[in-house]
Amino acid sequence: MIQQTIEQKLHLAFEPTFLDVLNESYMHNVPPGSESHFKVVVVSDAFLGDRLIARHRKINTVLAEELAGMIHALAIHTYTPQEWNDKNQQSPNSPDCAGGGK
């Protein structure tokens, strides 16, 4: 299961204080049961001092194998623990699919 693989890899790489991996494939025009569109929320001290692009590069590096084949779209939300608390421990909702979604 791709979702479990993503969770395991992100846990090992970032030791997050909060991790949420959501399979949002159902929101898109894909067959039922697909695992191709994901949203990840990672809260970790590993992002201290990093700009947004550096954080995303870290995530992309960890998930390079999955992004090269199985994952079509990945929404990434990264926070330090303080940023996460400042945002009331909430990440933005994903937008509706623009490519023929449901």
Image (spheres, rainbow, N blue to C red):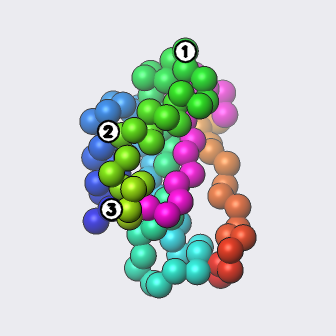
**Residue type at numbered disc 2:** His
The C terminus is located in which quarter? bottom right
Identify the residue under disc 2. 11
Callout 2: helix, strand or loop? helix
First along the sequence among labels 2 and 3 = 3
Callout 3: helix, strand or loop? helix
Q: Please state the horizontal and vertical placement of residue 41, each as a whole percent of the image.
A: 51, 44
Q: Is residue 50 left or right of residue 4?
A: right
Q: Please state the horizontal and vertical placement of residue 101, each as a whole percent of the image.
A: 65, 78
Classed neighbour count for the residue bearing mark 2: other residues with Cα under 10 Å, few (<14), some (14–19), many (≥20): some
Asked whether the residues under the numbered discs 1 and 3 touch, taking CB atoms below 8 Å apart as contact, a structural biologist would say: no
Asked whether the residues under the numbered discs 1 and 2 touch, taking CB atoms below 8 Å apart as contact, a structural biologist would say: no
Identify the residue under disc 3. 2
Q: Please state the horizontal and vertical placement of residue 29, each as a whole percent of the image.
A: 58, 80
Q: Residue at x 33, y 62 (%)?
A: 2
Identify the residue under disc 1. 49
Q: Residue 63: within the magenta?
A: no
Q: Is residue 99 left or right of residue 56?
A: right
Q: Is residue 88 left or right of residue 26?
A: right
Q: Is residue 67 left or right of residue 92?
A: left
Q: In the rendered structure, which segment of residues is drawn in magenta?
A: 71-87
**Residue type at numbered disc 3:** Ile
